[in-house]
Image (cartoon, rainbow, N blue to C red):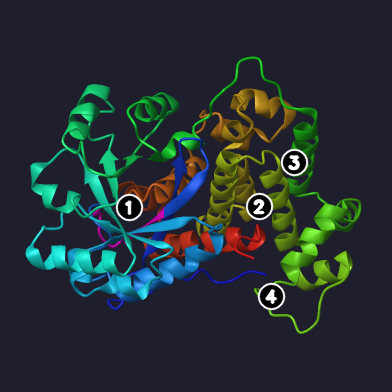
Amino acid sequence: MTQTPTPLPTDSGESVFIARQPIFTAEQKVWGYELLFRSSATANTAGVLDDDLATSQVIADGFTLARPGLSQGQRVLINFPERLLLEEAPMALPPSLCVVEVLETVTPSQEVLEIIKRLKSEGYTVAMDDYIGEAALDPFLDLADILKVDILALDSDPERIRQALDRVKGRKLQLLAEKVENETVFAQCRELGFTLFQGFFFSKPEILPGRKVPAGAAAKLSLLKELSSPDFESSRIAEIINTDPALSYRLFRYVNSAAFGLSRKVESVRHAVNLIGQKPLVHWLQAVILADLNPSARASEVSFLSLQRAKFMGELAPALQISSQTAFTLGLFSMLDALLRIDMEQVLESLPLEAELADVLTGRAQGALHSMLVLARSYEKADVPAIVEHCERLGLDQSLSDAACVQAMNWVQSVLGLGE
């Protein structure tokens, strides 16, 4: 079931995309997510959006998009520009789910401080963003519940981080370390008293020496490879699903969900194949198998990103005269090392791929497929300058890639049954 990618609309007509970044506890369980709203119309990474693009409707639409993926108790952090704070825009979102993030660029005027007090009186949690020890932000610290410390801006230096934290001693603040890029920095921040962590440390392969691909995982990888083959026979779909009761149950939940809006329930795999079509059903099956490779909370976020990449790249491929199946497969397999905690070269021994894909996955190729993968990673990090650069390099219309990003997030939540 293919949909035309649609970006989040704005009053000015510019397209906007969303990056969804997980926030982990010290035990590496998902505490919540930050939603980052960006426009590729400008290479501006500061703040949420330019003021002419940042509207209450854009933020509300983004929240609606992300909400189905929340488990019970999880929260969503959203940046609000000063203008929207003064308009009390956060009041449109539920205080039990939304954490209001105050940008470090917001002036702590009396008017802004009064708005924050009012938000807190209504039950909202308030987070202070990108703190590195600036005295100018002290007025906010008496009102904030969560303090986000920019670890990268402090060069991930434990002594500099400690100095920044010394300025907030005595305040009842929950400390969130943001831009944590590897396991070493994660461990250092945990030792310094941080209880929440944001960054791409979770997606970096934590290779365990001597670890081999488990037998169960090897069988799943073999099935993923078969499903990715251009010679795959559609009759095999029913055979694969019918021999696994759990897969059958999940398929029926998927096709009978509200997303399909069916007037009567689907009760056979053959009916599902006829209704959805072979390609979307193969993609669903790949998504489910990938998610089952590692059931941990951290790994579930790696699976989410892998699937989002796959869908994103598959949507963009036709515009680049690249096979959608090839692009989808590359995205799907691009984080297997992080998922299995095994070096990619070793993973590929259990998953023999075409040389073109294997070379991209191991960093030996730098062509269009590699650029697409880098573009997908840039969207995940909401790195607008990199997005602009790689869209230009690929000759892509940025509004098309913005739309594909939104479509991919929607699709992953649908196929994984998030929020049901």
Residue 260 badge: 4
Q: Distance between the residues labelled 4 and 1?
A: 35 Å
Q: Which of marks 2 and 4 is in front?
A: 4
Residue that mark 2 sits on: 325
Residue that mark 3 sits on: 225
Q: Quadrant of residue 344?
A: top right
At horizontal 67% and vertical 41% (from top left) the residue drawn is 295
Depth order, front residue of 5/322? 5
Q: Distance between the residues labelled 2 and 1?
A: 25 Å
Q: How far apart are marks 1 and 3 (CA)?
A: 33 Å
Q: What element carries label 3?
A: helix
At label 1, which amino acid type do we have? Answer: Val
Which sits earlier in the primary sequence, circle 4 or circle 3? 3
Instruction: Give the vertical position of 374 relative to 186 (above or below).
Output: below
Residue that mark 1 sits on: 388
Magenta part of the protein: which range? 34-44
Which sits earlier in the primary sequence, circle 3 or circle 2? 3
